[in-house]
Image: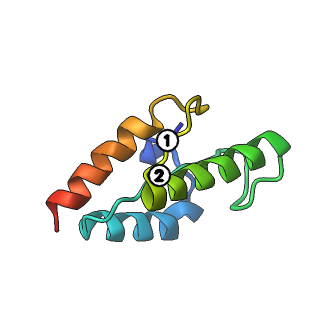
Amino acid sequence: MPYNDWRAAPSFLATTFEVFTGLNRLEKPVELVYYPIEDHQPDHPQARLATLQRNVDWYRFWLQGYERLDPEDKEQYVRWQRLRELNEASR
């Protein structure tokens, strides 16, 4: 699930928020996912698998228009479809 409470995030995420905010201001489709107990590359097998699957889902959605039938995050395609609409409207 995307991380929505930026006030509780640790300070080392500041550079990540800069990139996220910059892309957001440019009206580019972007989503930030924060794993509170993991580094940039998650070590925990379940977190690693989740992040890799989310990356594959993201690229397939944007490059191929493909949506997996049973994603772990049931709302991801709803969010991404909204991002697609915003992206198309900003062109």
Spatial distance from mark 1 to mark 2, Cα to Cα? 6 Å
State which quadrant residue 19 falls in. bottom left
The residue at the point 60 percent across, 48 percent down is: 54
Report crowding for label 2: few under 14, some 14 to 19, many 20 or more residues within 10 A (C-alpha). Answer: some
Residue 25 coordinates in the image, percent (x, y): 25, 67
Residue 56 coordinates in the image, percent (x, y): 61, 54
Up the image or down, 16 lies above or below 8; here it is: below
Question: Which mark is drawn over residue 9?
Answer: none
The residue at the point 76 percent across, 49 percent down is: 48
Of the two numbered discs 1 and 2 on the same chain, state the one appearing first in sequence.
Answer: 2
Q: Do residues under tags 1 and 2 come within 8 Å of each other at their CB atoms?
A: yes
Question: Which mark is drawn over residue 67?
Answer: 1
The answer to whether residue 47 is left or right of residue 13 is right
Q: Which residue is mark 2?
A: 61
Quadrant (top left, top right, bottom left, bottom right) of the C terminus? bottom left
The residue at the point 50 percent across, 66 percent down is: 16
